[in-house]
Amino acid sequence: MTLDLIPEDLRKRYRFDERGHATSILASDFPNEFSEILGALRAFWLTEEAILTPGGGRSPISAAIDRFLNRKGWKTKSFDIKITVDGNPVPIPTHKIDNYKNRVGIEVEWNNKTEFYDRDLNNFRLLSLLNVLSVGVIITRQSELQELFDKLGKGKSYGPSTTHWNKLIPKVDGGGAGQCPLLLVGMGLETVK
């Protein structure tokens, strides 16, 4: 594991995991993108106000990370992929990546249905196989935050069947992203300000 390439201050605030040497790939082949990802994490703090803001569309938590990255040139990216069979194009549907720059894709899954993990991991798998994505990054919440949600009276909004670390890891370990290198980031109680 090369997670020691992530500065200690961030390792104290977030939980990190990786597959396929993602951190080494980012640090050596994509140092600018790696620095921007670390910058986004360093700038982000989870607030009770953001937790209490009703859902619908992008949560203020996902939007805050997206805004930081957008200022650094990260964009939402869709891919137009098709194969040709006997001269007839067959479209291969992929889902857009929320933040994409120079072969690195980032998805922030704060409070969605767990099927969003399947979608993201499959998308990363396919785009890696087609050699247009080198590393996929998923930023999500750690399961430990449920205690805080319950304390704030929002526990039902953030139920056990929504996106959180304990739902992500079995999907990753089950091969959901194929051979795509992954950096996984968990926001926990240490990210609360």
Image (spheres, grey):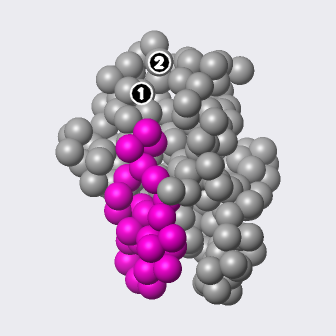
> Which residue type does callout 2 highlight?
Ala
> Which residue type does callout 1 highlight?
Phe
User: Are circles 1 and 2 on residues that touch, CB within 8 Å?
Assistant: yes
Residue 179, horizontal then vertical, whole percent: 64, 34
Q: Between 137 and 10, which is closer to the camera in this rendering?
A: 10
| Residue 84 appears in view | no
Residue 89, horizontal then vertical, whole percent: 33, 55
Query: Which residue is at a point 23% across and 39% down the rendered structure image?
Result: 72
Is 54 above or below relative to 164? below
- Mark 1 and mark 2 lie on one chain; the one further toward the N terminus is 2
Q: Quadrant of residue 57?
A: bottom left
Q: Which residue is mark 1?
A: 34
Q: Is residue 187 left or right of residue 56?
A: right
Q: Between 130 and 27, which is closer to the camera in this rendering?
A: 27
Q: Which residue is mark 2?
A: 27
Secondary structure beneath dot 2 equals helix
Residue 191, horizontal then vertical, whole percent: 56, 51
Q: Between 91 and 5, which is closer to the camera in this rendering?
A: 5
Give the residues drawn in magenta, as a range. 41-65
Q: Does residue 63 belong to the magenta stretch?
A: yes
Q: Is residue 76 left or right of residue 120?
A: left
Residue 36, horizontal then vertical, whole percent: 35, 33
Is 121 above or below relative to 28? below
